[in-house]
Image (cartoon, helix red, strand yellow):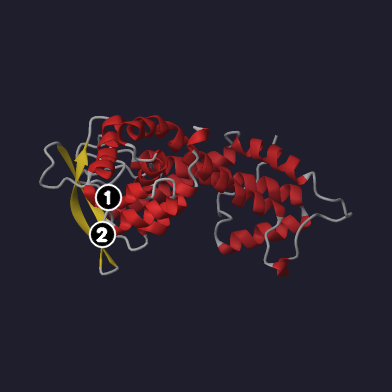
Amino acid sequence: MVERLDISAKLALDSRGLEQLRAQAKQSPDQALKAAAQQFESVFLNMMLKSMREATPQDGMFDNEQTKMFTGMLDQQLAQNMASRGVGLADIMVQQLSRNMAGQPETGKPAVLPASSGAQAPAVQGMSALPSAYSENAQQNFVDRMTPFAMQASRASGVPAQLILGQAALESGWGKREIRMPDGSNSFNLFGIKATSGWNGKVAEVMTTEYRNGIAYKQVERFRAYSSYAEAFQDHANLIGNNPRYAEVMQQAGNPAGMASAIQRAGYATDPHYADKLARVMGMIDVTKA
């Protein structure tokens, strides 16, 4: 079992807490590893609570920025209290990281890096790697769930599945920022396709970020709403595959950077960095793993 340290007063994510954790790593790597695992367990629980809050409609008469701030503070304290009692995640992380650290050469001294090197001690490195692994898993889970819809739409339209999935991931934040209907239900619009005058289906109105002359601003926009992900993916593929506006995109099939640049030139999004962002996201997607 992991020896529980008191983390109720401070997380290691602020500068002072991180320096204390680094100092502890020099004196006692094992204890620092346990503390880092507890810190991440607390962060993970807080992320989980935050995700649950975001999935719940918050448009009541008592919902405002002040209540959201205090709710966030309450969730953070609750996460720390839960982590101090332990939910088992820290134990698993300690076991895994201990095995990884066991491969370091024995020098008779704790295997830590000098503070002047600017690098992190192994326990802190492990903590940094864990959120990265969690993020990668969440991204792959999104790809796994959406690949069948993308493949079906790709076969019907000829639009590369990598492009379809790339835009779905970029526009929705890997499924974390899906457009919601006024009642909180899902619009299934992962692509940020707006409801123009020719759209006769359901509509979701949400605040979004647009760019004019490279300057970002907020405004309410009308977006298309669908009855399923399959319908949304098919509509996106039809838009890219059948609209002459995106003919150049289809000519770049198989070239992620070329498709991304062509779709920005066609005016799909107003973000001046859209092509670079889309190319990076497509580079992270491997449909063969789904």
How far is mark 1 from mark 2, CA to CA? 21 Å
Identify the mark at residue 246; answer none if there is no mark. Answer: 1
Please state the horizontal and vertical placement of residue 134, each as a whole percent of the image: 54, 42
- Is residue 236 shown to the viewer in this render? yes
Splitting the image into 4 quarters, where does residue 176 fall?
top left
> Tag 1's secondary structure?
helix
CB within 8 Å, label 1 to label 2: no
Q: Residue at x 57, y 42 (%)?
A: 41
> Tag 2's secondary structure?
strand
Label 1: how many residues lie within 10 Å, few (<14), some (14-19) or many (20+)?
many
Please state the horizontal and vertical placement of residue 39, each as a whole percent of the image: 59, 48
| Residue occupied by mark 2 | 210
Splitting the image into 4 quarters, where does residue 13 fall?
bottom right
Please tell me whether residue 265 is drawn above or below residue 95 in the rendered image: below
Q: Toward the viewer: 123 or 119?
A: 119
Q: Residue at x 52, y 47 (%)?
A: 43
Instruction: Check disc 2 and give the amino acid type.
Output: Glu
Q: Which of the marked residues, 1 or 2, is nearer the chain's N terminus?
A: 2
Q: Toward the viewer: 174 or 11?
A: 174
